[in-house]
Image: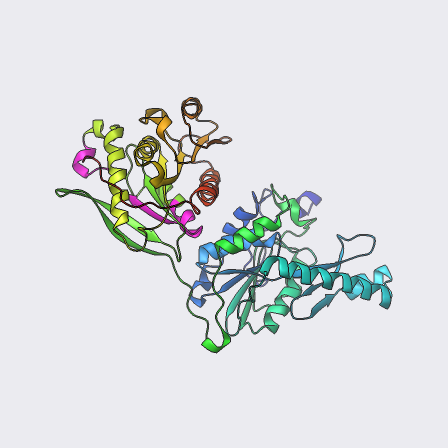
Amino acid sequence: MSDEERRRPTGAVTSLEDPPVLVQSEVRFQDRHEAGRRLAALLGHLREEQPLVVGIPRGGVPVAAEVASALGAPLDVAVVRKIGAPQNPELAIGALAEGGVHVLSERIVRMLGLSGAGLQTLIARAERELREYTRRYRGDREPVELTGRTVIVVDDGLATGSSALAAVRSLRGRGAKRVVLAVPVAAPQSLAALRAEADEVVCVEAPEDLWAVGYWYEDFRATTDQEVAALLARHASPAPSSEDGPAPAVAAVSARPLTVSVSPALSLDGDLTLPPRPRGIVVFAHGSGSSRRSPRNRAVARALNDGGFATLLFDLLTAGEESDRANVFDIPLLASRLVAASASLDEESEVGSLPLGYFGASTGAAAALSAAAELGSRVGAVVSRGGRPDLARNLGAVRAPTLLIVGGADRQVLLLNRAARQQLRCPSELAVIPGATHLFEEPGALEQVSRLAIAWFEANLAHASSPRGVRGGRP
């Protein structure tokens, strides 16, 4: 086997009994979020066990957040601190974890000729860091009770595996019934060592020559403490008391039909989706030739649900109205339907008091901006995906902070968005996704749309006020 072949990653490995499969080209993860989604695809069999997902800070937390989203599971951290070598802190001679867990590589300790006193100094420094980072990530919050639970511990990759080994032993010591180690990429020898400790090992790529974990990511920029805190807050779950018995089932996202009343003689079909404790509700306005079943809008809606926002997708037109193409481009008509949908939500006890946002695609974006102009402060934020804001009525009257997302290859629409933004008097941003076309069908493009939308609604909608009393428009 040539050196080039040895550097190529292997295929998915769900246990070390599965033989690695050599692929013909290097496979890298775009970033930790994409790695987490690929990892989550191998963990679906654990959903029924209602697991707790824990990430090893910092880099393991974005990966773990994607796993938690896919499994509908709460997210916590397994705080671990590496014990770095004296002259090379990046070289791990071991790791510490909560519960007094110490893991040391006797081979590296011997190789470096570390004395007892010198080693204890390194360990003491790591213990201080462990206490500091535990306070930083948890604050006053008690660790989640693990007794009797399945716990999935996630990192962004394994080199020596010392941090993961410390985490597994710590979780086991805290009472976890089953501990599953899940990583996107790892050295095979590290997986072998961890398999003796964890109940199950799940790995996407196990290259024969790992080199470094960061080599297998296109974007391996450092994860910040602020990102960790935001992800933990987004996926927070109250810790059950040990006196309460077994851990309760994880609250799941719920969905139900919702009829949007436009007039006494006209109603429209909608789908209302509610995550636990929603922070706001986003109403979707689909583009021409689409409906509430638009796969692209549904993908973004699922991401928003995972981010803690309720969503409403509904048909802006009846089947009979859609047959007349003039209705598809009747922006005042479509905007009035959004106003009617907003009024319908005011009558729903679960969402009536939540801050309201709009997500519009193509001509639906023009309808969303027109409705926002009419409703004023009732709308807390607007996001447009590949939209036609140039078709909106009275852009200057829009008060809601507005994000315009356009594909870099969608040149004509990009020009229209730039011109329309000049007319907006509200806070606004234009986000261009390089290489994306109008439908954002390129790999990873729609995921970028979802992340931008979540960040925009978190910044502008989650803390917005929610005045009541919307009045419906004309049918």
- What's the residue at 25%, 29% (across, down)? 332
| Front-lying residue, 266 or 183 | 266
293 sits to left or right of 131: left
31 sits to left or right of 246: right
**Spot occupied by residue 451 in the image (x, y as percentages of width and height):** 48, 43
| Front-lying residue, 43 or 134 | 134
- What's the residue at 65%, 46% (across, down)? 214
191 sits to left or right of 334: right
Q: Is residue 280 on the magenta stretch?
A: no
Q: Is residue 307 on the magenta stretch?
A: yes
How many numbered discs sit on the rendered protein? 0
**Spot occupied by residue 256 in the image (x, y as percentages of width and height):** 28, 54
Q: Can the viewer see residue 466?
A: yes
Residue 183, quarter of the rendered image: bottom right
Q: Is residue 353 above or below residue 388?
A: below
Q: Is residue 445 above or below residue 39?
A: above
What is the magenta range? 301-323
Residue 83, quarter of the rendered image: bottom right
View extreme (left): residue:
265
Say which quadrant the C terminus sits in: top left
The coloring applied to the image is: rainbow
**Spot occupied by residue 335 in the image (x, y as percentages of width and height):** 27, 34
Q: Can the viewer see residue 197?
A: no
**Spot occupied by residue 95 in the image (x, y as percentages of width and height):** 71, 62
